[in-house]
Amino acid sequence: MSEVIKINAPLTKEKAMELRAGDMVLISGSIYTGRDAAHKKLMEAIANGEQLPFDPKDQIIYYVGPTPAKPGAVIGSAGPTTSSRMDKMTVPLLERGLTGMIGKGARSEEVIDGMKRVGAVYFGAVGGAGALISTCIKSSEIVAYEELGPEAIRRIYVEDFPAVVVIDSKGGNLYESERAKYSKEYVEGKSK
């Protein structure tokens, strides 16, 4: 098992480019949340030449729509959303300096190509562990689109948020490399 890498957000392009697919990380610092409804509003703002509600340069977006917080809690359950829902709206944010995304599931070739062009990474978080992940979130503040409820853009402060680099800035992709590795092992095992 490889060493766990501690990352402090914001995530510069230089730091992002040092990470490799398969690296286990613990992220601390301020990151942003946003799902498809918020991304649609961001794309509208870009199309209309409007200023975005936050500067995506060197930022990480966590694809999450948290549940309401219980009394005394900072946030409710905060598990990752399927990232492909944001694929058609990701490249414009990458072009504006976004360096990290956290979610679950595969990404399109268009997004991977955009990541390679700008030096960004995609982190995988564990689906189904939203209540556990929420314990890493120490503060939460809505910064835009409050009318979207759970899909509003939030700035959250995380401490030791666990994730895995699934796709790195060079295009290394665990979804491809691990599938190929296990397919080969399966085929070789069957032939014995």
Image (tube, rainbow, N blue to C red):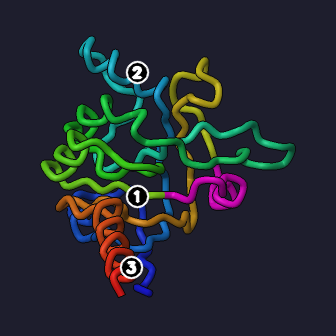
Q: Which amino acid, mark 1?
A: Phe
Answer whether residue 14 is magenta in the image.
no
Residue 32 drawn at (x, y percent): 47, 43
Residue 184 drawn at (x, y percent): 30, 75
The region drawn magenta spans 125-139
Q: Nearer the viewer, residue 53 or 180?
A: 180
Classify the position of the C terminus by image quarter. Answer: bottom left
Q: Nearer the viewer, residue 41 or 106?
A: 106
> Is the C-beta separation of discs 2 and 3 under 8 Å?
no
- The CA distance from mark 2 to mark 3 is 47 Å
Q: Secondary structure at mark 2?
A: helix
Q: Is residue 138 visible?
A: no
Answer whether residue 130 is magenta in the image.
yes
- The CA distance from mark 3 to mark 1 is 33 Å
Residue beneath disc 3: 190
Above or below: residue 68 compared with residue 75: above
Q: Tag on residue 123?
A: 1
Q: Nearer the viewer, residue 52 or 170?
A: 170
Foreground disc of the pair 3, 1: 3
- The CA distance from mark 1 to mark 2 is 22 Å
Instruction: Please tell me which of labels 2 and 3 falls first in the chain.
Output: 2
Categorize mark 2 by other alpha carbons within 10 Å: few (<14), some (14-19), many (20+).
some
Q: Secondary structure at mark 1?
A: strand
Q: Which amino acid, mark 3?
A: Lys
Classify the position of the N terminus by image quarter. Answer: bottom left
Residue beneath disc 2: 40
